[in-house]
Amino acid sequence: MWTVWSSLIRWNDILPVAFGGTRPESLVVFQSSSQFIQFANYAALIGADPQFLQVFLHTILFVGFFILICLLAGLGIAAVLDQRIHGKDCSCGCG
């Protein structure tokens, strides 16, 4: 939930705000200056880089094909392992 919330606000809590001495207490790192901006961060991300949508589409395709290949390989291995083993029910003691 924190990731979703932090993607919908504008905040500067990571950058140092005030410097006043050499002690760690004098460094104000967290300033509560968050402003709810809805999806402006995502719009800026899409608008800032013309290749973003192409890279995003390639990532989605890569993940989709990877999941499909893993699913098919898993089903294939399960089908092979589910087959009856010949000689398993041999009553002569040879299997």
Image: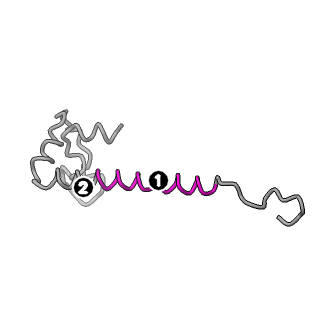
Numbered disc 1: secondary structure: helix
The N terminus sits in image quarter: top left
Residue 73 on the magenta segment: yes
Q: Nearer the viewer, residue 4 or 72?
A: 72
* Residue at image coords 22%, 58%: 21
Residue that badge 1 annotates: 72
Q: Which residues are magenta?
A: 60-81
Residue that badge 2 annotates: 58
Numbered disc 2: secondary structure: helix
Q: Nearer the viewer, residue 3 or 95?
A: 95
In terms of sequence position, does the residue under pointer 2 or pointer 1 come before the other? 2
Residue 44 on the magenta segment: no
* Residue at image coords 26%, 50%: 29
Measured Cα–Cα span from mark 2 to mark 1? 21 Å
**Label 2 packing within 10 angstroms: few (<14), some (14-19), many (20+):** few
* Magenta stretch, main secondary structure class: helix
